[in-house]
Amino acid sequence: MSILVIAELREGDVRHATYPAVAAGKKLAALLGTDVDVVALGKGAKAAAERLKDFGPKTAWWSEAAGVADYTAEGHAAALAALVKEKGYTAVLAAATTTGKDLVPRLAALLDAGMVSDVIGFAKGDAGTEYVRPMYAGNAEARVAVDTPVHALTVRETAFDAAAPGGMAGAVAELAGVGEAAGAKVVGYQFTKSGRPELTEAKVIVSGGRGLKDAAGVKLVEELADLLGGAVGASRAVVDEGLVPNDLQVGQTGKIVAPDLYFAFGISGAIQHVAGMKAAKVIVAINKDEEAPIFEVADYGLVADLFKTVPQLIEKVKEVKAKA
Amino acid sequence: MKIMVPVRRVPNPDVKVRLKKDGTGIETEGVNFLVNPFDEYAIEESVRLTEKAGGDVFLVTIGGPENEETLRAGLALGAHRAYLVTVPAPLDSAGVAQLLAAVYAQEKPDLVMAGKQSVDTDNNQAAQMMAGLLGIPQACFAYKVAVEGKTATVQREIDGGLETKEVALPAVITADLRLNQPRYASLPAIMKAKKKEVKKVTPADLGVSPVSRTRVLGLSAPPPRKAGQRVASVDELVEKLINEAKAL
Amino acid sequence: MDFELDDIQKMVRDTARKFAREEVAPHAAAMDKSGKFRPEITAQMAELGFLGAAMPEEYGGGGMDYRCYAIIVEELSAVCASTGVVVSAHSSLCCDPIYRFGTEEQKRRYLTPLASGQMLGCLGLTESQAGSDASNQKTTAVRDGKEWVLNGSKIFITNGGPAGVAVVIAATDKAAGVKGLSAFIVSADTPGYKVAKEEHKLGIRASSTAELVFEDCRIPAENLLGGLGEGFKIALATLDGGRIGIASQAVGIARGALEHATAYAKERIQFGQSISNFQAIQWKLADMATEIDAARLLTQRAAWMKDQGMKNYGKEAAMAKLFASDVAMKATREAIQVFGGYGYVEEYPVERFYRDAKITEIYEGTSEVQRMVIARAVLRD
């Protein structure tokens, strides 16, 4: 029995989401009384393995072979399936990022493994490990059991605290025999560059919805976010209007976030949006519609015109910061 | 071009689900079921592809007879025919993938276009699993799809932006939110849908015995949030955030 | 007795509801304010087949039943009563009489473009001296060789402004009273046909309510609809069907008001709790819901009778319209009450629903006329 955590690399660096995944892996290993290993594939994998060996795994695997240099589900799943089968891992997991969601189900099929998506917790049950995961846009939590010898999981990165370095350093080992990805090729990327923190990592998020109306409204959101060192988020309406990039969408099928403080300006609070942000510690909503469902989930609700009140808020925050 | 579109019936995503008290599922009485919104994007994209290049779009759904209504709704969006695979009990994503792979083996489509996730289970697994079982390429979370001969070029929505991936057909593509704007089912299309073929098959007809690999043991409500409060002004809000919530 | 909608009716409901929510609702308030209906909406509805739902496919229609038609009008009216009546007046008051009483040639010429939504239609019946007393017609039609010459004017004609075709009732034999009225199909581009005035109204402000003026308006003899002297019979038969449409509109208005009131009640906190916890509010919502259900059932029953080919559904249609319009008045009044002050201001939609409801008690036969129709049937039985 042992656990394998799949690290995620982006442009040669370990993505932040890997650390909560490692933490989840360690937690699961402790629960089952077994060990955890990590694996990194792609450009910069060797350095990543060197780094991750200090975070608790027994072995940190890596490969920078051509077949996995660029991430493709086809290439990575094949390589990982071979590793899991060879070493006999009984659970393989990754953070539920777009990569994890793309990769792990394919890997699960190659291993004939049952899979649980978006795990937020687990416990020992009568018949084995019971995984807890959200369903119905987070309006229900399900306990799920896996009936196969190998379990495949994605874990919600906001549900586990990032792993910290410590304990005995693991061994670093290169993965051999990694083949080519058949029939699939990445031909380019378009990343939206921003100096702001990533939504899934930010402690403060300022988010806007249809009530922002246009670019002027978005500027207010950005101004407050920058004042507070936070990230900018959006509801689907704003993204669909082309006012912000697609990957700023917070919601059931977009980003799931759990910051300490979440501002929702001009957001009605549709089920799909709330699913993505209701785990925030403190939620503040400003909306001129008294009926808006967002007020059901907000800790502090202000029924007012955001174009009047957000500038006031910005001034007030500046004052407070100046005094501090 | 032959395109296979798996379709699933989900409870109206705009209405909060009510859980059964015994934790075995959700209350379905009075609940309106619709085609999974992501599946509509998949149907629309497939219909557009065949409108441009000719071909045949067939839908596949798995479950009981109540799914026929869902299939008709999908057919009213322009798909040409459908399969209803009747199973005695619901299957998990792995079981679904096994059945879809079996239908694929019979039909041999050029492309499988699926919705990225079902908004009830939120699993986001079946399409990828199907691709893995069949050993064909996948391009998930599609924002734009272009098909040229035997290659599909897909712009995928990933964390931080977009990735452009080329996959050789046959392949599995999953539709994300912004892939297209599905058409409304016009009345003539609704009437036509009534006459389109819905083939009812069993797993035995497809030569498989699908088995779920996971089991849902129970459902419970998530921990409730503490009730919130209204504030009357920005000043009051900031004061509370600093002193009460200690968030600023 | 099967109260369920069949597959087709369910699909029609779902598509109409989706269309109403996404393409009509965002514009409803603005259209009400400006008094202008968006031609884009008419064009989209034409494409979806909403303007000929119950007309046979051979004439460009959807080939569906009247229950589907009622469902479409209700769904549209639940977000915008003006949109609901555009469809209803066009379908019941213009398409229907041409379908039922027209010659094959007339159906090909006029019904097909109407049912396929290429143009809108209206019914020219009401005059300044002929409201409830519809037979008191002053508009005349005089035969002149191969033509009829129309003179007179019609008021309060729904869709009068944008209509491309009007079914017009006129007196062909003044001496014969009711039996001297005939129906005609008049193309709006006929010389001598004029849209003279648009009314500014309390409600359904985006729906055109116009005065049509005929000044030596010459139409071909073939445009006589039905037989000479059958005009009044055609008008009454047409209104029976129209009442199903208006009843559906009223049900839609009431339902829309209930939905808004319910959502608001859940959100509004007073005295430290959601007002939806208070019995006074709960009872209002309960009464609204019950009456709306009853009104819808009466409406669907009348539509069903028409679908079954029953000739005499006049009493049931009148009952549906009478009851539903009353329900629309009550529901919208209570909805504003649930909203309190917010219900009275333009920023919230319920005041529009309240204003829109009133007309359902008036047009296509006032509630008083409906009672006349029902009483006559009761006393006859």
Image (tube, coloured by chain):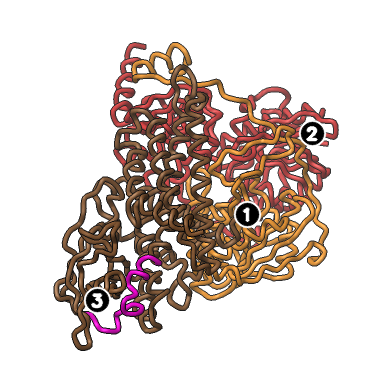
Image point 70% across, 71% down: which residue? B107
> Which residue is at the front of the view, B86 or C251?
C251
Q: Colour of chain A?
A: red
**Disc 3 from disc 1: Cα separation:** 91 Å
Q: Is residue A308 magenta?
A: no
Q: Colour of chain B?
A: orange
Q: Position of residue A14 (x, y in %)?
A: 58, 37
Residue B164 visible here = no
| Quarter of the figure with residue C135 | bottom left
Q: How many marks?
A: 3
Task: Check the residue under mark 3 and report the chain it is in.
Answer: C
User: Label 1 amino acid?
Assistant: Ala
Tell which tag, 2 or 3, sits nearer the viewer: 3
Which residue is identified by label 3?
A: C172
**Disc 2 from disc 3: Cα separation:** 88 Å
| Quarter of the figure with residue C333 | top left
User: Label 2 amino acid?
Assistant: Thr
Chain drawn brown in the picture = C
> Which residue is at the front of the view, B204 or B245?
B204
Labels 2 and 3 in the same subunit: no
Task: Check the residue under mark 1 and report the chain it is in.
Answer: A
